[in-house]
Amino acid sequence: MIKKIILSFLISSLAFANYIDEFNKKNYKKALELAKAQCEIDCSDEKLNLILAKSAEKLKDTKEAIAAYDRVLIINENNIEARFSIANLYYENNNPELMRDELNYMLNNLDLSSTQKVRINNMLNNLDNFTKEVAKPYFIGLNLGFAYDTNPLYGNDNFTDFVGEKIRNFKNEKASGSLSFNFNIDGAYNLDLGNNYFAELYASLNNKKYLKNKSENYPDLNVLTLAINPSYVRDNHKITLNASYDFVLLRRAAFLHSLNMGINYENNVNDNYLYLISYDLSKGIFADSMDKDSNFIHHSLGLNNVFAYNDNIYYFNLNYDLENAKDSFSANSDFKNYGIKIGAIIPILNKVSFKPSFGYNHTIYKKVDSSYYSKRKDNEIVISSIFDYKLDYNQSLSFALIYDKQNSNHNFYDSLNYTSMINYRYEF
């Protein structure tokens, strides 16, 4: 009898080691098989059920995962890891009320750290947004804000030698800083077409008005955008077609019409990583006859990577842009651009998130500028810090600081601009 007990213990210990090894090797299918086999012998071990639940979750076996997490909580009702995991499973399977109950139980009954409390409150805020989206298929947003640019015309005080019939020394005087008022209204309506097909109808009106005398020629901006974005979703994959029209009112009463077509492919690889590949084609048509030769075709290719870690979101984006204006005589009309941007979304307090980012762009122009006997090449660095505060269900407030520096081999185009901005948003 004693030999049988010892043999049973050894077999149980070996199986325990095996499914842990398979799980650590990320062989979740084998780990799940071994854990379930062990569970048929004895299912009272907390770690056994955790590994069984995690393996099932990785394999998208939601029913098995929830059942195993439930057994963990029967054994130890204070297992915070299991409670977070089961709350996320409720969210992913469109059970917002069960998720809310689980999160509120944790807040009211468990001894949580301040970081864990912030995490739960952020999850509850996201749940409010999810419930809001499910409850109504549309949104209308209103943005009001002020910004101050130290160098709104992106000029400099450099002396430049221009070559023509004779060499002329010219000083590019930098304009003074200016405050601007920003107004934006946007909205979307989402249609569920059935069989995993969806469509979004989107519109926005953006206005930026510098609080300066018109004679100073500051770049006020007025943009109307209309778009329709059909999409197809299956499992972790999403394909979206983009079609939009932009009407832009420029300085000196000039108009720009822009027609845009694009396609995006998104793959949500797992709970912690997704990537997006995008291509856009734009045709710009200037309505003012003086600008007709600047009509352009613009190609844009992008690869966006998004990572989730410890409730923070990190992203790493690569972009390539190519623009041609075949009839233009300007040396600054045809170019290609290589860009990189990294950033994060970091919850730091209840309802407050910090969004830092760093961007670098290298632009090469196609034509030789006769004033410099060379092609123009620019390097631009943009660093931004944004703080978002969610006031309540409908309202948010954001504050941004932006550093934008451009160096060019043609020093006429060097610039440095600091922007500070405050914005209020109300979403219906």
Image: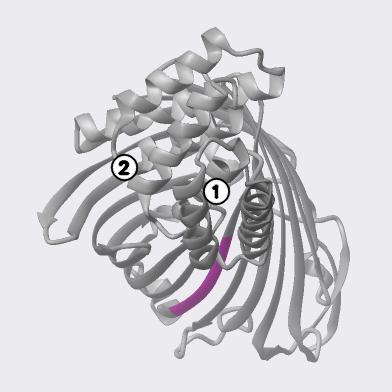
Q: Give the range drawn in magenta.
A: 298-305
Residue depicted at 81% across the width and 85% down the height: 372
Residues packed near mark 1 inside 10 Å, few (<14), some (14 to 19) or many (20 plus): some
| Residue name at image x 17 percent, y 61 percent | 197
Q: In this view, does 127 lie to the left or right of 314?
A: left
Judged from the image, the secondary structure of the residue bearing numbered disc 2 is loop
Q: Is residue 4 magenta?
A: no
Quarter of the image with the C terminus in it: top left
Q: Residue 316 at what x, y percent from top left? A: 65, 61
Tag in front: 2 or 1 = 2
Residue type at tag 1: Pro
Report which residue position mark 1 lands on.
Answer: 219
Element class at badge 1? loop
Labels 2 and 1 touching (C-beta < 8 A) = no
- Crowd class of label 2 (few under 14; some 14 to 19; many from 20; radius 10 Å): few
Instruction: Check disc 2 and give the amino acid type.
Output: Asn
Residue drawn at 59 percent across, 36 percent down: 46
The x, y position of residue 51, in whole percent, is 57, 49
Task: Tell me if residue 427 comes above or below residue 286 in the rendering.
Answer: above
The residue at the point 52 percent across, 60 percent down is 34
Residue 212 makes an appearance in the image: yes
Q: Please state which of residues 46 and 404 is positioned toward the viewer in this rendering.
A: 46
Question: Looking at the rendered structure, which numbered label has been put on residue 93?
Answer: 2
Residue at the extreme top of the image, as rendered: 108
Foreground of the two, 371 or 343: 343
